[in-house]
């Protein structure tokens, strides 16, 4: 009799486990496509500071024009350093 109870319990546990796995699998399948919403163009874009090599969000940096090219720097300091380095070489 005890064995029957154990089997019943195991069956219930297996049933709930499978149900849970199936649900999370289905949810993962449905959410899979649009987990990362695309950032607005040109705004939340990661750019690299050519002076110190740090990556930062474009709108948080400094925009500078070096030799006719628009460049982005993490700070005014890096912009100055880069300009000096460019004028030296
Ligand atoms: Zn920098």
Image (spheres, rainbow, N blue to C red):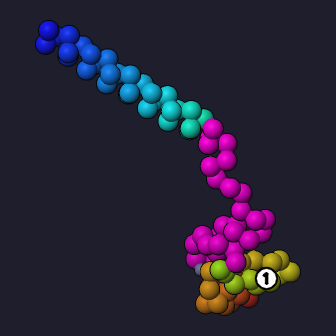
Position of residue 28 measured from the top left corner of the image (x, y, whole percent): 56, 38
Q: Element at badge 1?
A: strand
Q: Position of residue 6 (x, y in %)?
A: 20, 16
Is 25 or 52 nearer to us in this picture? 25
User: Quarter holding the N terminus?
Assistant: top left
> Which residues are the magenta region?
30-59
Corner quadrant of residue 77: bottom right
Furthest-left residue in this view: 2
Q: Is residue 48 above or below residue 67?
A: above
Left or right of 13, for residue 63 = right
**Mark 1 highlights which residue?**
66
- Nearer to the camera, 22 or 39: 22
The residue under the point 83% across, 77% down is 69
Which secondary structure class fits the magenta region best?
Answer: loop
Residue 81 appears in the figure: no
Q: How many marks?
A: 1
Could you say which quadrant of the image residue 49 lies in?
Answer: bottom right
Left or right, residue 73 beside residue 69: left
Look at 71% across and 87% down and name the residue there: 83
User: Looking at the picture, does residue 81 appear above or below residue 29?
Assistant: below
Q: Residue at x 20, y 10 (%)?
A: 4
């Amino acid at each position: 009799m005890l064995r029957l109870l154990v089997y019943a319990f195991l069956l219930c546990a297996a049933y709930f486990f499978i149900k849970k796995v199936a649900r999370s699998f289905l949810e993962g399948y449905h959410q899979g496509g649009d987990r990362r919403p695309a950032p607005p163009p040109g705004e939340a874009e990661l750019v690299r500071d050519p002076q110190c090599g740090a990556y930062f969000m474009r709108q948080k940096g400094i925009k500078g024009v070096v030799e006719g090219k628009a460049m982005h720097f993490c700070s005014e300091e890096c912009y100055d350093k880069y300009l000096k380095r460019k004028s030296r070489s």
